[in-house]
Amino acid sequence: MAKPNKKGPSTTVNVYCSQCRTRLFNYRKGGKGALVKCFKERINEDYTTTPCVCPSCNRLFAREALIRGTPAYKLIGGKVFAK
Ligand SMILES: [Zn+2]
């Protein structure tokens, strides 16, 4: 089991577009529960070509935001799923 706050989370998840199932990010997820935001520094692989837009169906799936001063994407509910 990964310990929290050791050197950041080590569990990775893939984030997909809920409409066309294109992979958007490979992300080091911390904690449990639903994925509602992605810190940019934790994204291992970014498969998008335009930030926050699915490269396949061009749907906006997130908005850029600063969370406690850290650049992040706030995911729009229902537009992505992670596994
Ligand atoms: Zn899509």
Image (cartoon, rainbow, N blue to C red):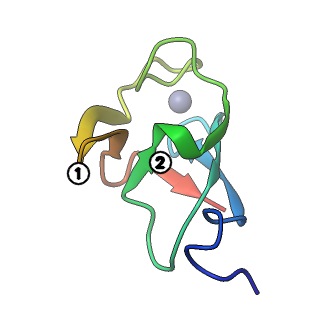
Seen at 72% across and 64% down, the residue is: 10
The quadrant in which the N terminus is found is: bottom right
Where 80 falls versus 63 (above or below)? below
Q: With 77 as the anchor, is 5 left or right in this view?
A: right
The answer to the question of whether label 2 and label 1 lie on touching residues, with beta carbons closer than 8 A, is no
Residue 23: mark in rendering? none
Is the residue at mark 1 in contact range of ligand 1, meaning its CB lies under 8 Å from it?
no
Where 23 falls versus 77 (above or below)? above
Seen at 44% across and 45% down, the residue is: 39
Residue 52 % position (x, y): 40, 26
Question: Which residue is identified by label 2?
Answer: 80
Q: With 65 as the anchor, is 50 left or right in this view?
A: right
Q: Which residue is at the front of the view, 50 or 6?
A: 6
Residue 37 % position (x, y): 38, 52
| Kind of residue at badge 1 | Arg
Question: Which residue is identified by label 1?
Answer: 68
Q: CA distance from mark 2 to mark 1?
A: 23 Å
